[in-house]
Amino acid sequence: MSGNPKYPAGYSLRKRRSQKAAFAIFRILSLFIVAVLFAILGFIIVKGAGVLSWDFLTKAPEDGMTAGGIFPAIVGTLLLMLGSAVVAFPVGIMSGIYMNEYASKGWVVKFIRLMTNNLSGVPSIVFGLFGMALFVKYLGFGDSILAGSLTLGLLSLPLVIRTTEEALKDIPDGIREGSLALGATKLQTIWKVVLPMAMPRVITGLILSLGRVSGETAPILFTCAAYFFPQLPTSILDQCMALPYHLYVISTSGTDIEAQQPIAYGTALVLIIIVLVINLLAGLLRKYFENRLKMK
Amino acid sequence: MEKIEARDVNFHYGSFHALKGISMEIPRNKVVAFIGPSGCGKSTFLRLFNRMNDLIPGARLDGEILIDGKNIYAPGVQVDELRKEVGMVFQRPNPFPKSIFDNVAYGLRVNGIRDKAFITHRVEEALKGAALWNEVKDKLNDSAFALSGGQQQRLCIARAMAVSPSVLLMDEPASALDPISTAKVEELICELRKEVTIVIVTHNMQQASRVSDKTAFFYMGEMVEYDDTKVIFTNPRKEATQNYITGRFG
């Protein structure tokens, strides 16, 4: 026996001090992030709030885009979000279900997952080029909301697949077994028990993808977005304006860049507000599903 | 004819030989307990009776398992039909995130029953059968998650019984429960044997001796001994059984 250990004097004090110091650093860094976020938001609000008005939201650009509003761009962005959702949500959710629930855990699934991950790393401008080649030229949709939605849908597909898969993976197997043991089929089990349980998290993924789509410029550059298209689109084969592209256009070209600046900030503010509102809706939807599920 | 009959059952997980040549008969409306140390194959064996092991990739079964004289692994047997006949209760209570009522009604609904009056009647019967009715009758629309662990497990028993199976498999049904809830589940087992044949896996030897008519002792994938519970616990024939029940290993 070597006797009781001799603890070094003051060590206990030192380790508590280093813990305090470490947590202080973590706290400062977290606050820094929040500060940066607020700075960006505040900057946009201060610069952009001045031009926000009913007319700004409901009128088309006028006088070589130095006056008027951004209504067509708001409508365009909302249409593109909707279009990409129609493309990506069903395909993405079904692929996610297939990958997690049906496919045997062999190399096929691993390969698909690897490809999905690679796809999410592809720069958005490359999606734009691909969309132009396939949808605009080869399939002959031309520059259109259809081509833009398909391109944006492809872009958000990996995110939708991944979040669906992750959400399903979190549902304990015991729940699936419980359902199967009562004579339910696999499809009934997924449809009635597993998917509803995963829904709050799936929805979060969907909303995140919408947020990303709303801000993308490159994919619609060659496939959909119009420099100036003041009337509203009447078919999915029309071009449309979109907020991020409009922001880019009036910041870099146009008749009078100085005069266009407030409009640019106003456009940015509207874009941010749209994303925030959608995130808020996502939160409410999530709550609704959790309540309906009686999770608590 | 016995209720369940296993004929020379061998089961492999990949290259692991999990069950080695097991043959046994389980009589109708009796409670049979499977005991043995962790990893001895008793749960694997139990899960063969409702083909729950079908889900495991790389698993292979040789031999036959007959329920009411029919091989449940014969081609053409539909697993969902089999599982209506052979219910299961799991180690951890696994209620669905639905109301108490919908949990018990689930098995009926997924098997195509739409008659509301019948479902309501059946749910009440099942909850009464699981000695849960008095505790939940005023809150059938509350979430099943709001129940205590012991109540959740009785709910799962009610859910299994609502489909009116003729066999109930229980995989360590009380191991996650406190002593009072455990006692309730054990009482329930003694009640349910009137309606169904029960096969229960347990780590708790007192439990096996309290609730079962016959006991099988498993060790390293083999069924070492199978006899009346009284015989197993008072006068086992094999030394391994003797050692296990007296706590010398396991």
Image (spheres, coloured by chain):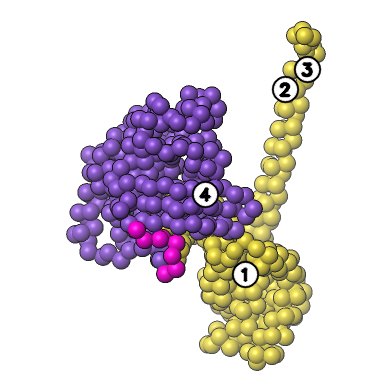
Chain colours: A yellow, B purple
Task: Left or right? Give the position of A96 relative to B158.
Answer: right
Q: Examine the rendering and report whether any part of residue A188 can be seen.
A: no
Indicate the position of residue A186 as horizontal and vertical percent values.
46, 63
Asked where in the image residue A42 lies, by quadrant, the reply is bottom right
Indicate the position of residue B96 as horizontal and vertical percent values.
40, 51
**CA gap, disc 4 and disc 2:** 60 Å
Nearest to N terminus: mark 3 or mark 1: 3
Q: Nearer the viewer, residue A16 or A278?
A: A16
Residue A157 bears which disc, if any?
Answer: 1
Q: Which residue is mark 4?
A: B21
Marks 1 and 4: in contact by CB < 8 Å?
Answer: no
Q: Which residues are magenta?
A: B69-76
Question: Which chain is disc 4 placed on?
Answer: B
Residue at point 49% right, 38% down?
B224
Helix, strand or loop at label 4? It is strand
Of the two numbered discs 4 and 2 in the rendering, the one whose residue sits closer to the viewer: 4
Marks 4 and 3: in contact by CB < 8 Å?
Answer: no
Task: Left or right? Give the position of A292 relative to B108.
Answer: right
Tell me whether marks 3 and 1 sit on the same chain: yes
Tell me whether marks 2 and 1 sit on the same chain: yes
Indicate the position of residue A183 as horizontal and vertical percent values.
38, 60
Q: Nearer the viewer, residue A134 or B48?
A: B48
Of the two numbered discs 3 and 4 in the rendering, the one whose residue sits closer to the viewer: 4
Helix, strand or loop at label 1? It is helix
Asked if residue B129 is among those painted magenta in the image, a careful observer would answer no
Q: Which residue is mark 2?
A: A16
**CA gap, disc 3 and disc 2:** 9 Å
Q: Examine the rendering and report whether any part of residue A7 can be seen.
A: yes
Q: Which residue is mark 3?
A: A11
Marks 2 and 4: in contact by CB < 8 Å?
Answer: no
Nearest to N terminus: mark 2 or mark 1: 2
Q: Give the main secondary structure, helix, strand or loop, of the magenta stretch.
A: loop
